[in-house]
């Protein structure tokens, strides 16, 4: 039956696959298990809640996702991670982004909406709505699908102390270890979705995602190589680099990243959040190379070391590009500030 217990609450429901986990107490307790995001939206509106297509960063706003492997969930998490990195910034533009991080610690499971309805209804009957407002509107660890902060290595859904644990759940936790996969959402989106549907992964901040509504889908993907490694340039074949990404394992190349290039590495989460694909290999599919430059510029077909802060390193890079890719040297060399200048408000 309908109600208005969610009145005043806002929900951003992400596109994706909505499944029912039979081992979850919360999922078992629901009588209306959704199959799509539309089902979740209907349930929210049926109980007086408001649906928003975009995260605005206001109080009593929740982001709901279906599956942690959904490309839209991955890109939203990347955006939240970057927003949280700006919390202490004093820049006006950064404060706008930081407001999103203030109210969001991650993406919530669809079962959280059902939990809210159940608890708020119980408190409404008991006449203690103030207690509900103080306690139940704050998600607990096991309500999160993916969190930006906290120890995500622990399955908090199974071991949270706010409810009893069944033998079945304990057996499930011990016999089904979670294998972390690090395949970028940009690659998943390009593989799992038809070209005409990839625009759904775009947002106001994904300026590097070539399938946005405002950009033609035949534009080249933005693939970024950071010049931060102590030796070599990795795989030169785009196919080999993609195969490594699809395997879901972290490239050993990242162990050779030098700490003195933190100005470059600090921009990599931003590149990913904006829809660009970061690679530790300087291969034929790379479009941008991040280097320490003397100014906030981008250089096409670099032939002089004059703009490089580290002249010898710049010379080695240009020599490698000339030898390895003599016929197709269309790489754009950019500075960390150039990357930051491309950010748009989340």
Image (spheres, rainbow, N blue to C red):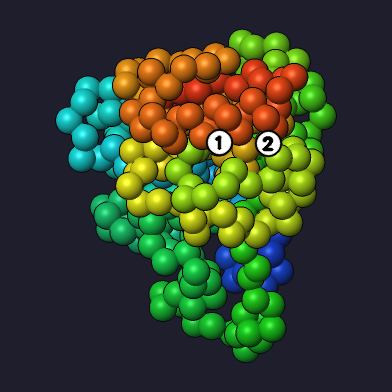
Q: Name the spot of residue 246 as percent of width and height, x first.
A: 74, 51
Query: In the image shown, does 106 or 340 lie closer to the viewer?
Result: 340
The reply to whether residue 155 is visible in this rendering is yes
* Residue with the most extreme right position: 194
Q: Name the spot of residue 311 as percent of width and height, x first.
A: 38, 29
Residue at figure coordinates x 28%, y 28% from the top left? 94
- Residue 29 in which image quadrant: bottom right
The local secondary structure at tag 2 comes to loop
Number of numbered discs on residues: 2
The disc at residue 283 is 2
- Residue 92 in which image quadrant: top left
- Residue 265 in which image quadrant: top left
Q: Could you tell me how far apart the alpha carbons at marks 1 and 2 are, in whole angstroms?
A: 9 Å
Residue at figure coordinates x 71%, y 69% from the top left? 22
Q: Name the spot of residue 141 as percent of width and height, x first.
A: 43, 64
The disc at residue 225 is 1
């Amino acid at each position: 039956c309908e109600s208005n217990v969610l009145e005043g609450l806002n929900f951003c429901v992400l596109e994706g696959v909505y499944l029912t986990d039979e081992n979850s107490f919360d999922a078992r307790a629901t009588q209306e298990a959704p199959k799509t995001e539309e089902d979740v939206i209907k349930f929210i509106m049926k109980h007086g809640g408001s649906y928003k297509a975009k995260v605005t960063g206001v109080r009593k706003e929740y982001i709901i996702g279906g599956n942690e492997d959904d490309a839209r969930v991955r890109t939203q998490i990347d955006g939240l991670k970057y927003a949280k990195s700006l919390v202490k910034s004093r820049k006006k533009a950064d404060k706008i982004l930081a407001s999103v991080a203030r109210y969001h610690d991650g993406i919530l499971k669809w079962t959280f909406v059902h939990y809210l309805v159940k608890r708020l209804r119980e408190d409404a009957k008991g006449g203690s709505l103030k207690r509900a407002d103080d306690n139940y509107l704050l998600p607990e660890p096991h309500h999160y699908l993916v969190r930006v902060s906290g120890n995500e290595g622990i399955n908090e859904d199974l071991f949270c102390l706010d409810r009893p644990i069944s033998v079945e759940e304990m057996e499930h936790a011990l016999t089904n270890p979670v294998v972390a996969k690090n395949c970028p959402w940009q690659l998943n989106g390009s593989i799992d979705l038809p070209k005409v549907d990839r625009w759904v992964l775009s947002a106001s901040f994904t300026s590097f995602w070539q399938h946005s509504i405002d950009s033609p889908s035949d534009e080249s993907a933005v693939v970024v190589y950071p010049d931060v490694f102590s030796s070599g340039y990795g795989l030169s074949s785009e196919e080999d680099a993609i195969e490594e990404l699809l395997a879901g394992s972290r490239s050993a190349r990242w162990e050779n990243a030098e700490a003195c290039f933190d100005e470059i590495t600090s921009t990599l989460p931003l590149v990913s959040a904006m829809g660009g694909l970061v690679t530790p290999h300087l291969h034929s599919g790379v479009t941008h190379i991040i280097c320490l430059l003397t100014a906030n510029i981008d250089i096409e077909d670099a032939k002089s070391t004059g703009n490089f802060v580290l002249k010898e390193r710049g010379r080695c890079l240009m020599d490698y590009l000339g030898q390895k890719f003599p016929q197709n040297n269309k790489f754009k060399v950019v500075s960390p500030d150039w990357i930051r200048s491309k950010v748009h408000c989340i």
